[in-house]
Amino acid sequence: MLRFLANLVSNEALLTDDPSSFSVLGFPSNKRKWAAQWKDPETKHCFLSGWEGLSRNERISKHNPPVTCRGVIVDLDCAPVELNFSKGYEPSFTSRSFSGGYHLHYLFENPLHLGNVSGLASKFMETLETKLALPALPGYDRNAFRNPSQYYEVGREWAGAGKPLDDSLVHAWFMCASKKFRFQDSGEAAVPIDKVRKYLSEKYPNKWPGGWESFDVGARGVRFWDDDGDSFSVIVRETGLTCFTSDRGFIPWRDEELLGAKEVNLYQETALTDPAKDIWFDGKNYWKPNSRGQWVCRNETQIKEDLHCMGLSNRSPEGGGASPVSRSAMHIRDDKQLKVISMFYTPPGVRHPNNPAEGVELNIGNVSALTPAPSFGEWGERFPRLQEFFEEFFFKEPRERFLAHLAHAYRCGVNEDPQRGLGCIIAGPVGNGKTFTANQICGRLLGGGVDASPYLVDGDNFNSNLVTNPVWTLDDVANKASWSEHSRFSKKFKRALANDDLPCRAMYQAPIMVRWTGRIYMTANDDYESLNALPRTDINIKDKLLILKANDVIIDPWITNEELEEELPHLGAWLLDYAHEPSYLGGRFGVRPWVDPELEKKILEVGPKAPGDEVLAAFRKGLTEPFVGLCSDLYDKIVIDNSTAASKIFKKPQQLGWHLKDRLDARDAGYSKKRTRDGQVYTIQPLEDETTDADADEDDAPF
């Protein structure tokens, strides 16, 4: 039987078991006339639909959604054509439409009850469309078929045996559609299936086919609460049971025949921890995985919104008290604290250290090093272009030191064992491949690089994009205008290398401390002005640096991106296998620090403290005995009594005091201090003439 309307303005859905009895031999020749006739409330005709609404005797509409399907009708807008169908997939009837096309009527053996679940009817129609291969039929009207509120004029020339589609076929198709449908969107409470299984197995022992241990989300079975239910018409969902032989279609867990409202309500009251199972607190912010599995940071307001979206109420219970959302947030703060880290070459997620005293950690890094080639060869055997480049780019010692440094960093990535490493500074001629080395070779081999100059040099505190990258690059950094600015850059550079944790801050969010174990590669030209931009080497940073001098490189043609992509895995395999010079390895950072002697001399000559050193050196050379006094006394001697040039460098005693502190921090033997009742008393030793006997001998040398 199918539902029908007497005219297109009627709201009453009637039943008929013989639609063909309403067919007519012809239609008015004028389209407007029959359109007006069909919309006339006095018209008694037949407009068919296979769907029934929630209110069965009313037409399908926005306010009366489809819940039961007795069959479906397919509209083909085509000229007369011979239609062939596969066995078992034939329509129950065919008829000719008023426009001259065809209607295919597929009746079901028994009504299929979907229940009042928004969107499920549309998902079922999409599945039917595929299973019946409707898009392959001539003139198929997809929009009409997918619209359950569509009613079809009964047409004429009805033909067919009236055989319905087998229940087993329809049920299988509905099963397929329901697997793709998210039933939790129905608004009903989702209860963990293990809790449902335990409760129902006690309430209905031996009633689930195959045993209750097979009762799981997606499983198919019988109406176990009904003694007469023997057909496999039940599908288990997170929020209840889909039953397409029941008038209701969908039965939620709170139904008394299943768990009942009391049991579901009890679960909801005690389930505050379930929505919070993947949410953690770092002392300031909350962390949770998003829909793509990426860990994201949330503040208090945002996490409460998320908990509410997960099903927890934000309303206070009757009689007062905190809402479930607030109580769940408190549970997270009290019982789920951790420390956020950004560890490279380690899967992201929550880590539980073997030592409980270390506490739980959340790794937000998701970086892996380039996979090495499966086999290795001799130096340059399978990476000839990179071999050619490196042998021109570095002399032997700096090249071997650089490759040892790169091998240590690469091994950390491949072995998923992140460790700290030296900062690497490369200085050389303009356009010789320094940036290519840092960004393309090191960056790609180690898993990705990012420009760190906004954070380290320019003072930008929003560095959340940096801590997720294993390589920071600094390319041709401009010299800072003042000594204090350069000191700030140098100390920030040192902190990134030496400290276990770095402050990480995203836009509009509070800073957090994260662990960073990457590498910094800085490149600069080898002229005096460019070298002046390098970090100060007098602040206990030399033991954390590898400073290398690069040569001019003449390679024609230059290494292409395709060649680099081909050769880098082989370079990686060689780095892992090669026995690097033992004297270059070891120490706190895995590789010994080293500064190219020629570059070190230049750096000392042009450093931002050099003018101040010259003033103090000139003062010390004029001493015949040690100077002892306060900083203000020294300021009077050097600036007021002595030098106009000194007054431009040390504009106030405090600046002179900072310079003296740097000398003491550098453990310069010419300076010492002692705290007295009057303040800090400095002792400055005379500076002897640096001319040596060797220098004197040079004047007498014959060449």
Image (cartoon, rainbow, N blue to C red):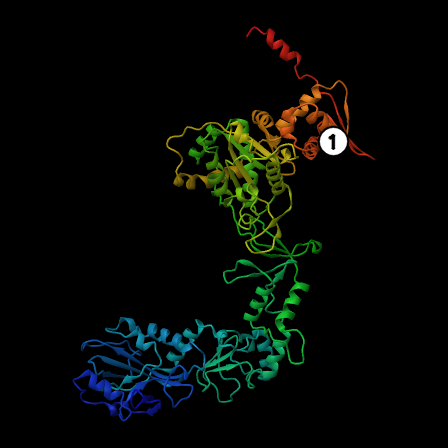
Q: Is residue 94 above or below residue 405?
A: below
Q: Residue at x 27, y 93 (%)?
A: 42
Q: Is residue 484 left or right of residue 103?
A: right
Indicate the quadrant containing the N terminus: top left, top right, bottom left or bottom right.
Answer: bottom left
Q: Amino acid at mark 1?
A: Ser
Q: Is residue 180 above or below residue 616?
A: below
Q: Secondary structure at mark 1?
A: helix
**Residue hosting label 1:** 632
Indicate the quadrant containing the C terminus: top left, top right, bottom left or bottom right.
Answer: top right
Q: Position of residue 300 (x, y in %)?
A: 61, 64
Q: Is residue 687 left or right of residue 249?
A: right
Q: Is residue 110 above or below residue 498?
A: below
Count the marks: how many? 1
Residue 538, quarter of the rendered image: top right
Residue 642, quarter of the rendered image: top right
Q: Determine the residue located farthest toward the right in the rendered image.
A: 677
Q: Position of residue 525 (x, y in %)?
A: 50, 31
Can residue 656 be seen here? The reply is yes
Q: Position of residue 411 (x, y in %)?
A: 56, 42
Q: Decide: few, some or many residues near mark 1? Use Cα within 10 Å; few <14, some 14-19, many ≥20.
A: some
Q: Position of residue 479 (x, y in %)?
A: 54, 34
Q: Please state which of residues 53 and 457 is positioned toward the viewer in this rendering.
A: 457
Can residue 271 be seen here? The reply is no
Q: Please state which of residues 280 and 191 is positioned toward the viewer in this rendering.
A: 280
Q: Please state which of residues 325 and 219 is positioned toward the viewer in this rendering.
A: 325
